[in-house]
Amino acid sequence: MVLNDDTRQIVHFINQLSLEKRSKRISNASEIAICAAWEDIGYEQALNLYSTENPPALGYVSSIAGRDIWKFLSNEFDIKITKKNFRCQLMELEKKGVITVDLSPPSEKEVISDSVQQNKGSAQKQYFGYQKELELGIDAIHNRWSLITTGAPGVGKSTFVSQLTRKLSDNENPFDKIFWKSFHYLPSISELISEWCQSLNIADVSATSLIQYFSSHRCLIVLDQAEQLLGPDSIQIYEDYIVFLRRFIEEQSLSSFVVTSVKPLNELIDFQGYGHSIQLITLKGLNNKAARDLLDSYNLNDQDRWDFVIEKYRGNPQALIKIATLCHDFFGGSVELYLEKQSTLIGASFINSLNSLLSVDDPLVDLQIKILRYFYDSCHTDDGISVNTIIEEVTSLGYSDSTSNILEALNALVHQSFVEKFDTEKVAHFRLPPMIRKYVQVNPNGLFAAA
């Protein structure tokens, strides 16, 4: 795609922003939509000017790729961005200093490729940790298995899968196509099938035609942030995706899928019974070395205090990056000064993710909320509470008279990273991680008021 300097810089800027915020590059169709908006021309004219050997369909560029980009930018900058106002809005953002697109000639600036341009003072984006998990995932994919990647909000699931696909691409990529869908909004399965069929120029837009394509071309499907499908208003959407994935498994064995979710999706794990091998990978936070490497990339001081921060946030990369940025921007890079002023930090995305998981109208979820409140009131040390004590006290509080329900709720809390499980003298003990304790204390939306 040959672009003039200004258009090339706009495409580059949005691509880098997408890499930073969504851990993925924008598609060729999205680039064409951006070019059309920036140059104030029609989508059809942009397709004619900037088409590739396999151009996307006009309807796909206008109704799918363009809509996705305008929604992404609108959410990112908290303003309404459309094709018509795209150029004016970005120039206004640059004028206000919100963004720096740098529309100077190429000879006057450094062109950055395959890396994320950070704000002044922050570290260049790198990938830290999870090397063993990456090797496990790559082996599974090469063996035509599928992956389910779970872990707490902010633990790096999307970045992990992005790195996984990058490593596959660097080492004899086995896939003809990689399909990536992040559930920032909730497309129905029919919308997603239509989007992918149009991008592949499949005339018969249907699940059957798409699965037939997967049967003859080795593809990787990435469904990122699938916990968004578990909200109270998306039950039917979730069930439709399960039906589609069931067909995907039953009717072909060439392609693979990767699903990331805070909550393990048992329906997918159960697909192993259909003869399709599935590898479950749980990300539990960076190990100490990887976490220290991350903090070191921000040039922070007080290294003797780093281990305290790493342990407190259980190596959660998103939390560590936020803390490193605050230390750099407000405390001269001093971790010690930051710790003097701050309690446990939890971000809005962390809260929103947990709110979604705990807002489902389900008796088991209601019991989980009550157990979380019980932990907050009763467990104030890292020693935790034994499983026997939990059963006795939760029963005495009248939360449940069923031991099996209590154990099932505990198990679900552990798998969702709400509660940590460890063994002491061969007996299971449980405790709240610091970030979850803070979440219960904040009590967003009054989830724990009636517990």
Image (spheres, rainbow, N blue to C red):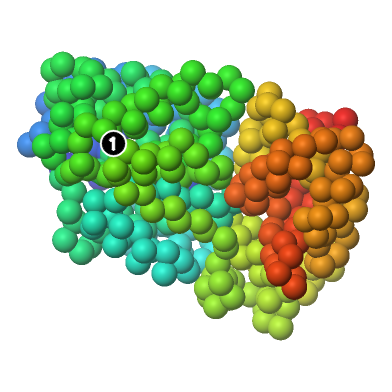
For this view, does 383 lie left or right of residue 176? right
Quick one: quadrant of the C terminus?
top right
Q: Residue at point 67% right, 81% down?
A: 303
User: With respect to residue 338, does 29 lie above or below?
Assistant: above
Tell me residue 92's x, y (percent): 50, 34
The one of 105 and 316 positioned closer to us in this rendering? 316
For this view, does 368 lie left or right of residue 341? left
Can see residue 221?
Answer: yes
Tell me residue 411's x, y (percent): 65, 48
User: With respect to residue 130, does 96 lie above or below?
Assistant: above
Quick one: quadrant of the N terminus?
top left
**Mark 1 = which residue?**
249
Q: Residue at point 34% right, 32% down?
A: 245
Q: Residue furthest bottom?
A: 304
Rate crowding at label 1 as few (under 14), some (14 to 19) or many (20 or more) other CA atoms within 10 Å.
Answer: many
Q: Residue at point 59% right, 27% down?
A: 231
Tell me residue 246's x, y (percent): 34, 31
User: With respect to residue 208, does 141 lie above or below?
Assistant: below
